[in-house]
Image (cartoon, rainbow, N blue to C red):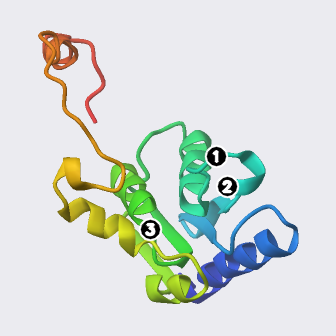
Amino acid sequence: MNHEAFLQRAIDLAVESVKDGTGGPFGCVIVKDGKIIAEGKNNVTTSNDPTAHAEVTAIRLACEALGDYQLSDCILYTSCEPCPMCLGAIYWARPKEVYFAAKHSDAASAGFDDSFIYEEFTRDQSERNIPFYNIELRDKLEPFLTWEHTDDKTEY
């Protein structure tokens, strides 16, 4: 497996994203059995979708291509260490490995600093920059109870 070549493709996609004006300097490829099955570029600003990061885009396309919500036999290559959102998406998709080139500190130096999000995780919900409030409703557990009592569900 030529990890460097796949990682270089992710970097090339990141450069393309900037040059063609589709988004920020991030790219991602997902590989299965030595072949690229999906590619993603950051297109947050052109799609008006704050979740349209390269990794999330590539994960969506790879899952669609495989007809599965898991990427357990896949390897993800990304031009930069994933942000907290992408890290969460990667863990939910469950690829077998992840390779990245630039570190999050490199992204921060270029103006893409996500350290404030990591800091938010450590704060009490009401003390976050965007406050979170828990409202206790009587039926709050109904979705989970329904899930638990449904026999024909797909576990994930």
Q: Distance between the residues labelled 3 and 1?
A: 16 Å
Crowdedness of circle 1 by 10 Å Cα count: few (<14), some, many (20+)? few
For label 1, the residue is 49
Q: Residue at x 50, y 67 (%)?
A: 76
For label 3, the residue is 83
Residue 132 coordinates in the image, percent (x, y): 27, 41
Q: Nearer the viewer, residue 146 or 156?
A: 146
Q: Earlier in the sequence, mark 3 or mark 2?
A: 2
Residue 108 coordinates in the image, percent (x, y): 51, 83
Q: Earlier in the sequence, mark 1 or mark 2?
A: 2
- Label 2: state its secondary structure: helix
Q: Which residue is drawn at 28% across and 18% down?
A: 153
In this view, 87 is above or below 6? above
- Label 1: state its secondary structure: loop
Q: Of all residues shown, which one is farthest toward the right?
A: 20
Q: Which of 125 and 51 is in front in this view?
A: 125
Q: Would you say 15 lies left or right of 71 here?
A: right
Q: Residue at x 38, y 63 (%)?
A: 84
For label 2, the residue is 44
Q: Which of marks 3 and 1 is nearer the N terminus?
A: 1
Q: How far apart are marks 1 and 2 (CA)?
A: 5 Å
Q: Which amino acid does label 2 sit on?
A: Val
